[in-house]
Image (cartoon, rainbow, N blue to C red):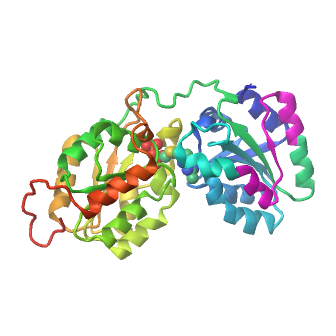
């Protein structure tokens, strides 16, 4: 059964939920959009699910009833504050969880498989009562009353929502031709310029979502490691490769939402200072892969953070010429480099999934071979002292 997001929100408001935080999932695209436009609800776009829960706890301490919305992949980010804050201090919260990779959806992407099969058991293990959303207003109301009973006993409650159970009313498009006014470069154009400027031997680790899919569409090569889950960890993986293999240049292709989710890694990279590392952030000021919800990069200067964290060279690019020059410059000087590229939110209409050609394991194996036995490219001489 399908219920409209408007109905869901109306029932939540009726039960006096007035504070909302979370990290989006494409299944909740319409919900996040509606909440952000709703004058009765205070909404906080959190950088990670853990901090969304902490915001909700703060609101609860101040006497406001809150909802935290997340994809089940974000359960991994939430377990610590859930167990050591919410449960220990008896500050119950309503969790609205989008379940990806459910056992009866085997066609969902592989990164959701294990969490999809574990979500219910994990909640049981954590002693969080849950209910599956049945897509009817009566069923949802009954669930909210069950949640109420749990709250009386200072226990949190989770509602599990499946793909397609909430119908959109605002027409948010996920993976359509979203064309937003603003920056001239699209992710696709930026990736073409970057691919052009990189050496064939450069290793690339790309972040979760459309950026990996766009890279796969434009330039699939064994030197690319496409991250498909683990949002926010692409730069640490890339920097790990760079530190372990100082003779190869490694590029992290990151997104703004991903960087914000685990921003502490910038400090670690500045500290570890891999000279052969280039960190590129394609900043479209949104979680575009899940419907274009605004990220807080709109009001943050990520390049200033990178400077403060000790990256050796930092650039901000808006035009294709600036981007081409910055990538080329990073070839001739020592890193770690940070390159923030402002891009718009448009993508090609249908982005292929990496898994249409490679399983994650095949991708890993091809990448390892490319890393350890570089293909024979015709290499130009590198300037002295610069890693190849
Ligand atoms: C822990 C976790 N939370 C949420 C998601 C859902 N998700 C997948 S891609 C994505 C958006 C990432 O935004 P950004 O890094 O800015 O890249 P963009 O989509 O804008 O290219 C989100 C929220 C996820 N995969 N993992
Ligand atoms: Mg983004």
Percent coordinates x, y for residue 328 in the rendering: 17, 54
Give the tally of numbered discs.
Answer: 0
**Residue toward you, 239 or 309:** 239
Quadrant for the C terminus, please. Answer: bottom left
Establish if 144 lies above or below 47.
Answer: above
Q: Is residue 245 left or right of residue 257?
A: left
Extreme residue in the left direction:
381
Q: Nearer the viewer, residue 235 or 43?
A: 235
- Residue 236 shows in the view: yes
268 versus 176 height, above or below: below
What's the residue at 39%, 44% (across, down)? 212
User: In the displayed structure, does residue 93 sit left or right of residue 49?
Assistant: right
**Between 233 and 203, which is closer to the camera in this rendering?**
203
Q: Is residue 168 above or below residue 234?
A: above
Q: Residue at x 43, y 28 (%)?
A: 178
Task: Measuring from the top left, give residue 1's x and y in whole percent.
Answer: 75, 25
Any part of residue 50 in sight: no
Residues shaded magenta: 119-144
Q: Position of residue 20 (x, y in %)?
A: 70, 46
Snapshot quadrant of residue 160: top right
**Which of the pair 354/173 is nearer the observer?**
354
- Report x, y in % for residue 65: 80, 49
Q: Is residue 123 magenta?
A: yes
Toward which corner of the image does residue 102 lie, by quadrant?
top right
As for residue 207 lying within the magenta part, the answer is no
At 28% across and 53% down in the image, what residue appears?
A: 223
């Amino acid at each position: 059964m399908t219920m409209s997001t408007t109905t869901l929100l109306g029932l939540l408001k009726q039960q006096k939920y007035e504070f909302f935080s979370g990290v989006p999932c494409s299944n909740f695209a319409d919900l996040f959009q509606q909440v952000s436009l709703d004058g009765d609800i205070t909404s906080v776009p959190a950088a990670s699910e853990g901090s969304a829960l902490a915001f909700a706890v703060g609101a609860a301490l101040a006497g406001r009833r809150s909802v935290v919305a997340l994809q089940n992949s974000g359960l991994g980010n939430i377990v610590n504050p859930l167990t050591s804050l919410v449960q220990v201090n008896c500050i119950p919260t309503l969790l609205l969880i989008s379940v990806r990779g459910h056992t009866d959806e085997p066609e969902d992407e592989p990164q959701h498989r294990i969490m999809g099969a574990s979500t219910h058991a994990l909640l049981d293990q954590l002693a969080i009562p849950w209910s599956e959303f049945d897509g009817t207003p009566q069923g949802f109301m009954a669930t909210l009353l069950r949640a109420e009973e749990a709250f009386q006993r200072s226990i949190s409650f989770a509602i599990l929502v499946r793909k397609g159970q909430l119908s959109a009313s605002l027409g948010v498009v996920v993976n359509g031709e979203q064309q937003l006014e603003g920056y001239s470069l699209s992710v696709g154009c930026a990736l073409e310029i970057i691919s052009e400027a990189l050496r064939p031997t450069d290793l690339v680790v790309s972040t979760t979502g459309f950026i990996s899919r766009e890279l796969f569409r434009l330039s699939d090569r064994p030197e690319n490691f496409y991250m498909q889950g683990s949002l926010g960890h692409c730069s640490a993986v890339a920097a790990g490769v760079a530190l372990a293999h100082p003779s190869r240049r490694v590029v992290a292709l990151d997104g703004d939402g991903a960087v914000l989710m685990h921003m502490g890694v910038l400090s670690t990279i500045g500290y570890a200072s891999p000279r052969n590392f280039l960190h590129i952030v394609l900043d479209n000021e949104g979680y575009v892969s899940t419907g274009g919800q605004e990220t807080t990069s709109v009001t943050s200067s990520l390049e200033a953070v990178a400077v403060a964290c000790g990256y050796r060279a930092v650039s901000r690019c808006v035009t294709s010429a600036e981007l081409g020059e910055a990538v080329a410059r990073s070839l001739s000087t020592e890193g770690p480099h940070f390159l923030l590229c402002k891009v718009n939110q448009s993508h090609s209409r249908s982005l292929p999934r990496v898994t249409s050609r490679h399983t994650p394991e095949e991708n890993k194996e091809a990448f390892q071979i490319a890393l350890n036995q570089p293909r024979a490219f015709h290499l130009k001489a590198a300037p002295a002292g610069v890693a190849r």
